[in-house]
Image: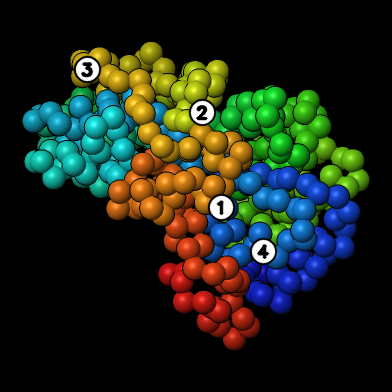
């Protein structure tokens, strides 16, 4: 199966779903960590193929969703300066701060630009030496190497007008925090394949052993996810708690050594606050002192920022697998993509965005039939 269509084959998916049903004898709760997996599950109706009692819950794997409001406010304040060109991926522009978002800054005349790579922002800094160019460095381990490379090149090429607002978070500490919670109901994990493509999966092995929980590194297509669920259920039914790799076509146990070396050159592990969740020790990345001159928070003096605001958004409960988006009274009514109360409604990996997009009509399966074409016109 080398191509996308083969990973979306409805007959093959039905076979795996049947195999899952055959080995499932008890109710189990499995969390998919990544927001990309959540979107695939909701889009293709994967959860509806599973036997009754086998529950998938959504995890904190949307970096936009977990970026704390204090950093959004910092981004807004920096982007509002006349001497700054503020660069970001598009998702971040609609994420609410305390009083407005980056899109509002742009609408009021701020120079806020969408870029597709931190290196695009670095190139902009070279072309605009009279301006300060700031890149919003958001993401998990997946995007950290590219952001590290941009900072590394800025320092070694003498691009002094380039800095980054760092909002990096790490997956394993978040999983550990979930498992250690007295309210935890997660019994197995589907780990995000792209994170493991960079970092490998050795960090998951102590978690699996310590908490006696199976962790399956999984891809993002329907058959990837179904196979990941199958492997996870098989472990649960057999009383095993190991790390398995369903995504072997992309992920190696040791990960990408060159990417890891670049991350370690520029970043160090630091504490991080997660929106809706709170502080998780050792769950983030910060620039090492030798790169501090490219730290936007040190370059720009900021006013005292709000720590939180009253909101109906239940993002924290959703990101920890406690509730589904449709459990929120504001979902689809007072909270929509046009008027979001929280980041999960506007991020392309947000769980609320997935349910809003694919589950507001009567449930149906979107897996394509053989011969092409999807069974429902909803997916793009």
Q: Quadrant of residue 298?
A: top left
**Distance of mark 1 from mark 3, alpha carbons?**
36 Å
Disc sitting over residue 38 in the figure:
1
Q: Earlier in the sequence, mark 4 or mark 3?
A: 4
**Distance of mark 2 from mark 4, alpha carbons?**
28 Å
Given the current orientation, which residue lies at the most extreme bottom position? 371
**Distance of mark 4 from mark 3, alpha carbons?**
48 Å
Q: Is residue 341 visible?
A: yes
Q: Earlier in the sequence, mark 2 or mark 4?
A: 4
Q: Earlier in the sequence, mark 1 or mark 3?
A: 1
Q: Is residue 35 visible?
A: no
Label 4: which secondary element: helix
According to the picture, the residue beneath numbered tag 2 turns out to be: 277
Residue at (70, 42) in percent of width and height? 189
Left or right, 196 with reference to 150? right
**Distance of mark 1 from mark 2, alpha carbons?**
19 Å
């Amino acid at each position: 199966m080398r191509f996308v269509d083969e990973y979306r084959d409805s007959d093959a998916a039905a076979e795996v779903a049947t195999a899952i049903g055959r080995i499932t004898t008890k109710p189990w709760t499995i969390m998919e960590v990544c927001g990309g997996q959540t979107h695939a599950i909701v889009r293709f109706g994967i959860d509806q193929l599973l036997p009754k009692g086998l529950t998938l819950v959504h995890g904190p794997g949307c970096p936009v969703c977990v970026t704390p409001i204090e950093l959004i406010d910092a981004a807004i304040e920096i982007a509002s300066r006349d001497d700054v060109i503020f660069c970001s991926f598009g998702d971040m522009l609609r994420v609410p701060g305390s009083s407005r978002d980056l899109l509002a800054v742009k609408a009021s005349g701020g120079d806020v630009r969408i870029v597709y790579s931190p290196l695009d922002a670095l190139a902009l800094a070279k072309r605009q030496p009279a301006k300060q160019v700031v890149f919003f460095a958001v993401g998990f381990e997946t995007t950290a190497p590219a952001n590290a490379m941009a900072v590394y090149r800025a320092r070694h090429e003498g691009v002094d007008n380039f800095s980054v607002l760092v909002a990096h978070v790490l997956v394993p500490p978040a999983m550990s925090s979930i498992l250690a919670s007295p309210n935890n109901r997660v019994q197995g994990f589907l780990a995000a394949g792209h994170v493991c493509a960079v970092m490998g999966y050795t960090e998951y092995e102590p978690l699996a052993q310590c908490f006696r929980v199976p962790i399956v590194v999984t891809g993002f297509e329907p058959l990837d996810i179904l196979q990941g669920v199958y492997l996870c259920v098989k472990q649960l039914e057999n009383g095993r708690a190991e790390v398995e790799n369903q995504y072997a076509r992309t992920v190696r146990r040791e990960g990408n050594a060159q990417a890891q070396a670049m991350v370690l050159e520029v970043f160090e592990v630091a504490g991080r606050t997660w929106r809706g969740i709170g502080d998780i020790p050792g769950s983030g990345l910060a620039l090492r002192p030798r790169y501090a001159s490219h730290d936007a928070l040190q370059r720009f003096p900021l006013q005292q920022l709000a720590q939180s605001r009253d909101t109906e958004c239940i993002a924290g409960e959703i990101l920890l697998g406690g509730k589904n988006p449709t459990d929120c009274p504001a979902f689809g009514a007072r909270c929509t993509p046009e008027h979001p109360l929280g980041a999960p409604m506007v991020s392309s990996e947000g769980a609320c965005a997935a349910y809003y997009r694919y589950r507001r009509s009567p449930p149906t399966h979107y897996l394509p039939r053989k011969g092409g074409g999807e069974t429902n016109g909803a997916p793009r």
